[in-house]
């Protein structure tokens, strides 16, 4: 138990940030400070407060696929997520395969390419079911958009062909949106990620015909 005695006049005039210790009980008292015309008041009755452990609870989100040779989900495996935070997953089929279904906590979400757990309050699961593409190596949308060079040291060229791109967003592997480029009308548009750290990033490209997620490597 820690006893803290503060003069009320100082508390009123000056904000005080107390260096409190997690998991500790504190007893607070107060009194009015002595001035040139008034004596100090008696110490007030005490009040007891306890601090928490200072850390947010964490939950486990587990990501899996039915066959790792058919496609990927990023992040993959067990991810520890703080309570109240968000985490986004990116789903990419390999050449010759496609997304059949995505199950979140056992509930079908359809053939989606991204999913966000928002305001996490419990453990969760996301499972991706890939299937063979029956001779189709990529969707028409994915084939229509080229991104190069990949890997890149900073400049990325998006060749949208005949499509109208409504928006391009850049996310890191934790699902944090870092950049956004609206309405790319030019057949070729260059975006700059040279200021980002080396690593894997994801481009979410929204077009008039739907959206696709592309993985890029920044060297």
Image (cartoon, rainbow, N blue to C red):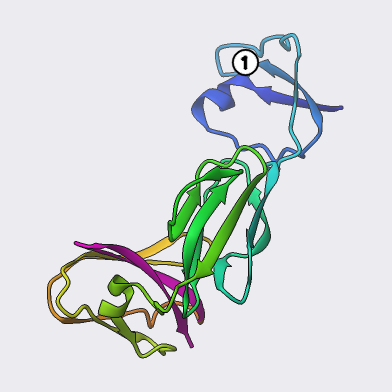
Residue at the spot 47% in from the left edge and 79% down from the top edge:
96
x and y, in percent, of residue 92 in the image: 48, 70
Q: Residue at x 68, y 62 (%)?
A: 77
Q: Position of residue 44 (x, y in %)?
A: 71, 10
SS of the residue under disc 1: loop
Which image quarter holds the N terminus?
Answer: top right
In magenta stretch: residue 204: yes
Which residue is denoted by mark 1 in the rendering? 32
Name the residue furthest right.
1
Visible residue check, residue 173: no
Which quarter of the picture shows residue 212?
bottom left
Compared across the picture, whether 176 is left or right of 8 comes to left
Does 121 sit above or below residue 128?
Answer: above
Start and end of the magenta stretch? Answer: 199-219
Q: Is residue 8 left or right of residue 60?
A: left
Nearest the eye: 141 or 217: 141
In front of the other: 101 or 200: 101
In the foreground, 3 or 123? 123
Q: Quadrant of residue 146?
A: bottom left
Q: Residues within 10 Å of mark 1 (few under 14, many from 20)?
A: some
- Residue 66's image quarter? bottom right
Please provide percent x and percent y for residue 11: 57, 26
Coordinates of residue 39 in the picture (x, y in percent): 64, 12
């Amino acid at each position: 138990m820690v006893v803290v005695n503060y003069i009320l006049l100082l508390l009123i005039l000056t904000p005080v940030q107390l260096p409190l210790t997690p998991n500790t009980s504190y007893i607070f008292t107060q009194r009015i400070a002595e001035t040139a015309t008034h004596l100090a008041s008696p110490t007030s009755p005490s009040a007891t407060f306890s601090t928490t452990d200072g850390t947010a609870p964490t939950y486990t989100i587990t990501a899996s696929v039915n066959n790792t040779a058919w496609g990927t989900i990023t992040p993959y495996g067990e991810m520890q997520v703080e309570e109240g935070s968000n985490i986004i997953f990116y789903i990419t089929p390999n050449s010759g395969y496609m997304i059949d279904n995505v199950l979140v906590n056992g509930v079908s979400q359809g053939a989606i390419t991204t999913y966000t757990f928002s305001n996490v309050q419990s453990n969760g699961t996301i499972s991706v079911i890939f299937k063979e593409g029956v001779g189709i190596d990529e969707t028409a949308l994915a084939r229509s958009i080229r991104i190069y060079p990949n890997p890149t040291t900073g400049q990325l060229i998006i060749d949208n062909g005949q499509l109208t791109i409504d928006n391009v967003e850049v996310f890191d592997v934790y699902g944090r949106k870092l950049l956004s480029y609206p309405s790319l009308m030019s057949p070729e548009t260059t975006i700059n990620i040279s200021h980002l750290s080396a690593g894997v990033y994801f481009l979410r490209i929204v077009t008039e015909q739907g959206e696709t997620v592309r993985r890029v490597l920044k060297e």
